[in-house]
Amino acid sequence: MRRLIPLLLLGGCATVAPTPAAETLVPAGHVAPVVASTGGPTLRSVLAADPALEPLLAAARSASPDLETAAARVLQARAGLRAARAQLAPTVDANASVTRRRQSQEQFGPNAPPGLILPTLTFYEPALVAGWEIDLFGRLSANRQAAASRLSAATADAEGVRLTLETDIARGIVAVRSLDGRIAAATEAVAAARALDHLARVRAEAGLVTGLDSATTAADVAQAEAALPPLVAERTAQVAALSRLTGLSIARVAETLGRDIALPAPQWALPDIPSDLLKRRPDIRSAAAQLTAADADVAAALAARYPRLTLTGSLGWLSTTVASLFTGDALSASVGGALSMPILDFGRTAAEVDRSRAVVAEAAALYRGAVLQALAEVETELAAARGAGAQAAELARTVEALRTARRLSESQYRGGLTDARAVSESSRRLADAQDRQITAAGQALDAALRLELATGGPLSPVTSAP
């Protein structure tokens, strides 16, 4: 963490701070940035097999209010940069005036020859006026640098909004597919419970078992059926969330998602986490750009203490008649320069410098916080993705073992070697393990998507698997 301190000291400089190298920001011993690729297909290529992903992403890109807001901020910053650049160039204005004036004859005294001065005159005066402030001490250049950095920050923010939106949509699709799998497993458990209940009632009517078996299996049917409504309700909520993200109607989202699409198997590689992690994260790039902009504002505030040199020139015509307006005798021109600097402003310039330096200190703190947040998120999501993937793999083996156990218990029950309680117990354990396994597989994909977002993405464009 000591390596971060020199970067934060840039906030006290009055010059534009360079963007620091990302590798100097990673504390020693940080695990995530040196993770090697595990090989195999990427998460993006696995998700690309889902036909709902690209249509929902396309809909969100065209109708998301968050993206529209971010794009508007980019346009604002771009216009600010154009305005800052224009301050470095000369300005040329055109103006024209028509003035009708009445002179007092008495001001020339009683001895003035009559008719020497016309009592009423009309003056026509068109002119071109040019001005150019020479950027002696870099104030205008600093303003331009600040505007350029704010455009970079707005662009990075827009990219972050897009990545977050697309990741949320992908996570929503994974959640729906996970719930579809859980609903299918719960439906299978209901069918198995009903089949066992039917067999228990037949055996009870034949006097082969007591009524305890049929009561047990009837309770199992009710318990299996009770597991379905919450899953269906949760799926509906996920579809509604995707509707909000994409701007499509709930019915259109449900139609796009379709049914009978399995959750992608966790046979994908965790994304590489490169050493330039902090250059890829949009929020860190935005914070760095804001720090650079704030530093440039300090430079501009300091330059405001020094003299300003402005060159001016004008070219105009003045005549009392339109016919002689653009003649040589009516022509007037001037050129000059003006040098100005503050002498006594009662601390306004110094206060602006102090304010700008305080903004730099704030931006540096935000930058440091963004770096630490990024490192924490990568560590957290990497551990979550690995843990959920390992759990899903272990539960998959558990499910296979419990399938065998249930099959054996059903065979023993049909042969009269055991009662319905043993079959009921094995069925409940299998249904629970299936639900947990599908949930863990979905959580592994969800954590991997969050990890991809934490490393700076991007999720799009979606590419087909090789």
Image: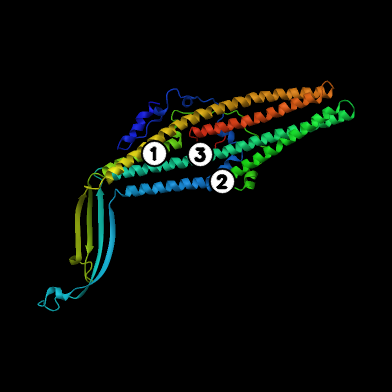
Q: CA distance from mark 3 to mark 2?
A: 14 Å
Is 356 located above or below residue 207 in the figure? below
* Image x and y of residue 75, in percent: 42, 48
Q: Are marks 1 and 3 in contact (CB under 8 Å)?
A: no
Residue 402 placed where, x, y %? 72, 24
Residue sitting farthest toward the left: 111
Mark 2 or mark 1, earlier in chain: 2
Residue bearing the label numbered 1 = 289
The residue to which callout 2 is attached is: 59
The three-letter amino acid code for the residue at tag 1 is Ala
Q: Earlier in the sequence, mark 3 or mark 2?
A: 2
Q: Residue furthest front?
A: 346
In percent of the image, x 87 and y 30: which residue is there? 202
Looking at the rendered image, the quarter that the C terminus falls into is top right
Which color scheme is applied?
rainbow
Helix, strand or loop for disc 1: helix
Task: Tell whether 461 sits left or right of 225.
Answer: left
Q: How many angstroms separate mark 2 from mark 1 (CA)?
A: 30 Å
Nearer to us in this view, 210 or 194: 210
Q: Is residue 138 visible?
A: no
The residue positioned 49% from the left and 32% from the top of the image is 455
Query: In the orientation shown, which residue stands out farthest toward the bottom?
Result: 114
